Amino acid sequence: MTTTVITGIGELVTNDPGREGLLGLVHDAALVVEGGRIAWVGPAAEAPEADVQVDAGGRAVIPGFVDSHSHLVFAGDRSAEFEARMTGQPYTAGGIRTTVARTRAASDEQLTSHVARLVAEMRAQGTTTLEIKSGYGLSVHDEARSLAVARQFTEETTFLGAHVVPADTSAEAYVDLVTGPMLAAAAPHARWIDVFCEDGAFDVDQARTILAAGSASGLRGRLHANQLTYGGGVQLACELGLVAVDHCTFLSPLDVESLRDSRTIATLLPGVEFSTRQPYPDARGLLDAGVRIALASDCNPGSCFTSSMALCIALAVREMRMSPAEALHAATAMGAAALDRDDVGVLAPGKAADLVLLDAPSYVHLAYRPGVPLVAGVWQAGRPTL
Ligand code: NIG
Ligand code: FE
């Protein structure tokens, strides 16, 4: 098998818990890639010989971003809704139905090429692992085909039939549909099941029922909770021991205690607060309480249409008082943990060789230089893809 050594890495973020500090930094580093995986990491002066040598030219290298929350399968445009919001309209989940109508009307080919474009956009910005949800189909046929499209791009697919209740249905009948025929059609294409647990979407009892049905079909649960209002979603996620609960914007002291006492990761999505002018989640308070945090984009046409994990890091640092190191860790290693993956998000022997070269001397520039395209190269499974 061909081996490749990347030398001349000015600063290497490994996220290896066996090394010092949160990020396990190595300066003047090299790493060796073999068969899609990392074979060796260490000081450049000690690097072993390899078949191919690549010079990073003093750049910083980080693990590829792990974006554990996105809604890429959709059609249509909601920029007018965004514009109205920026001139005073509040964000409501009502816009989801606009996207549902457009998504149902799109062909499989249109949906696939749209997802391909967004995935390419993410990759060019350094995302090497991503999760994709359904949730703009809301019929048996349209949820199943949304997931079949998503599955072409990632193993991390999530059935979000319980996004909102479609216009022409009662909540009770819709929960029966989601937990019955829709779940049966979706399950073969999905790894996860998610519910939008919120006023105006699904309540805690409905979420519990839907997650239980998903679990009986072999899907693992995750939750959208406490995005727009206080509620019981976060506590349900902790009680059920879900891997992740996402948004966590409106948290009571009891919610924070539940998170602290559980292994459930709070996935914060600061692009949403930026794009809806909502207050940001209290990342600092959560971290200080000992809660595990991931950062993700929530890329979707309504509440947040960015695919940039670097923007999320910059917002987390500027607006949520995370340190640059905490924010990068949350966007890589913790994103992987939020997908229950131990093969990505860390650059150590045996892990996937998914990495990003930055046109910068340090990872700190991700937050220090907001909006600047710093990604100089992306390697996926040991091969340069950019
Ligand atoms: O994560 N919260 C629910 N779903 C998306 C928004 C969907 C939309 O507005 O289209 C979210 O913010
Ligand atoms: Fe979401």
Image (cartoon, grey):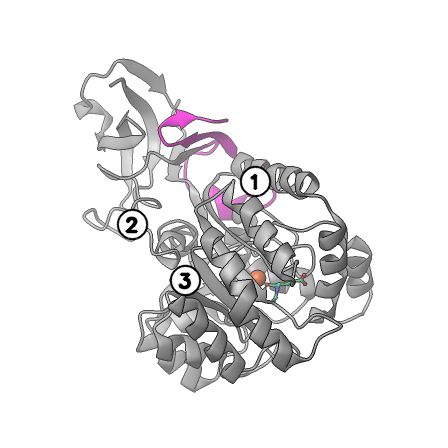
Tell me the quadrant of ligand 2: bottom right
Residue at the top extreme?
51
Q: Which residues are magenta?
A: 357-386
**What residue type is disc 1 on?**
Val
231 within the magenta span: no
Give the residue pinned by disc 2: 342
Image quadrant assignment for residue 383: top left
Residue positioned 46% across, 79% down in the render: 208
The image position of residue 199, as x and y in percent, is 63, 81
Give the residue pinned by disc 3: 219
Q: If you read the primary sequence from the N terminus, does the residue marked by circle 1 or circle 3 appear first? A: 1
Q: Callout 2 environment at 10 Å: few (<14), some (14 to 19), or many (20+)?
A: few
Q: Report, in whole angstroms, how far the alpha carbon at label 1 lies from the one at label 2.
A: 22 Å
**What residue type is disc 2 on?**
Asp
Q: Report, in whole angstroms, how far the alpha carbon at label 2 lies from the one at label 3.
A: 19 Å
Question: Which type of secondary structure does the marked residue at label 3 adopt?
Answer: loop
Q: Is residue 41 left or right of residue 151?
A: left
Q: Report, in whole angstroms, how far the alpha carbon at label 1 lies from the one at label 3.
A: 24 Å
Give the residue pinned by disc 1: 119
Residue positioned 73% across, 58% down in the render: 99
**Label 1 close to label 3 by CB (< 8 Å):** no
The image position of residue 238, as x and y in percent, is 37, 76
Number of on-image labels: 3
